Image (tube, helix red, strand yellow):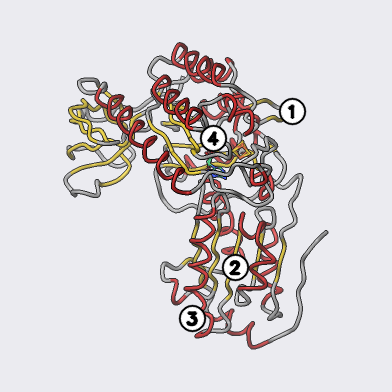
Amino acid sequence: MNNTYIANNDQNTKDTLMSNKTYFIETYGCQMNVYDSELVATQLEKTGYKATKDIESASLIFLNTCAIREKAQETVHNRLNSLEYLKKRNPDLLIGVLGCMAQNLKDDLLLNKPYVDVILGPDSYRRIPEIIQNRVHSMDHLVDTKLSKFEIYDDLFPSRKDGVNAWISIMRGCDKFCTFCIVPFTRGRERSRPVDSIVTEAKKAVKNGFVEITLLGQNVNSYTTPNGDFSDLLEQVAKIEGIKRIRYTSPHPRDFDDKLLNVMSKYQNICNYIHLPLQAGSSTVLKRMNRTYNREEFINLVKKIRYYLPNCSISTDIIVGFPGETEDDFLETIEMVKINKFNSAYMFKYSSRPGTKAAEYENQIDEESKQERLERLIKTQSEITLLQNKKKIGSIEYVLIEKESKKSKNFWSGRTDGNTWTVIKKNNEKIKDVVPVLITDAKGVTLFGKSLNHKETIYEAN
Ligand code: 5AD
Ligand code: SF4
């Protein structure tokens, strides 16, 4: 069903909109949303809109939303409530909700937030210019949350500000259906973008001064096209001249193969870093999560990665308090964190997502136990992160300078190959340089070091 409807006609609206065409996009959630917001910006700029940093004066406000946990949704609800006064002040203001919440909660939004004009799911951004044109003739809501089996926006290129790292989406959607996750419902089926289109975008990014590329997808390693799989794509990107660093996120442990490790070890500009979501340490819980691997398989995969890529940093995602998780199951998660010695982890309390299988499971865990488990897990992982970072003291790490340190303008902040933020005293280096750094200290999640700045040291792609 195509649930788009447009009505009414108002010439005044058109005139007002045309005289002040500025947009403000606020992005919530994952990097895929950051990328999508850049695509949306391109679409808006096509219709003559210009970006503004001042939300109060914008004539169009889009919130690109996230539905992964309840808290993310609450944040957007609160934000929308706080924007209602702007609409009252200026009825011509166009407010839009984009992304996963639009997909998930369109009826709720239509009912409870009548001042939201536009509701667009993640596969509907191609229609933005047309929607804006129609909107100027219309004062009614516009909703399009139809999911597509094909939309990959392969011919649309994002409007990027200057920066060090360019995110490039290589596939959309997810077919894994982990029982806790809303993504397969909000973002639809898996589709891969052609190799050529990705390589073109990467080359463009390099030309525009970006030195790091991060390939993005819900499941990057299920990427598949007639011209190659994920490893083939990674190799193509690694060969592009001028890319100092390549990262990717996130692979699924099930689809991780030796070919990928081979490509990673072959190219120096592919970072020694893998984000490998574990989710839970107990095989019983993993089965009920539909993760399609068990505890032993995950441990063996981590061992294999460290064998092929000895200095590879590994981070992970972990959920505590999944329905039915016993204290013993949770202790297995704690044990897994210790066995695998992750360099870092994103840790979450399970959040029930209506419509997913796990939301229907019995034995939902109470909030207090979830909180208590989360705190124990964070404590254990923080100790391991610090231990892993302390091991680096005395070694030389290559740091890509990204910005001035927040603490002092005499220091730079950048990331190591293994994705650890590192602070160094400014010498004669500049942003986007890769410099050898002698690590002298580790505190919390951050490394501190001294630049051994021999003018400039830059990775060469093989
Ligand atoms: N509750 C808590 N965390 C979740 N994630 C996905 N769905 C949920 C949920 N319902 C986490 C997973 C995933 C990360 C992006 O978000 O750990 O890897
Ligand atoms: Fe969600 Fe699982 Fe797909 Fe990741 S792999 S997006 S956790 S369903």
Q: Work out how far the residue at label 3 is from the one at label 1, CA to CA, in angstroms.
A: 51 Å
Residue type of the residue flagged with mark 3: Tyr
Whether the residues at callouts 1 and 4 have beta carbons within 8 Å, the answer is: no
Q: Which numbered disc flags the more N-terminal residue, 3 or 1?
A: 3
Whether the residues at callouts 3 and 4 have beta carbons within 8 Å, the answer is: no
Q: Which mark is residue 96?
A: 2
The answer to whether mark 3 is within 8 Å of ligand 1 is: no
Residue type of the residue flagged with mark 4: Glu
- The residue that mark 1 highlights is 226
Whether the residues at callouts 2 and 3 have beta carbons within 8 Å, the answer is: no
- The residue that mark 4 highlights is 325
Q: Residues within 10 Å of mark 3 (few under 14, many from 20)?
A: few
The quadrant where residue 286 appears: top right
Q: Work out how far the residue at label 4 is from the one at label 2, CA to CA, in angstroms.
A: 39 Å
- The residue that mark 3 highlights is 85
Residue occupying image coordinates x 64% and y 68%: 109
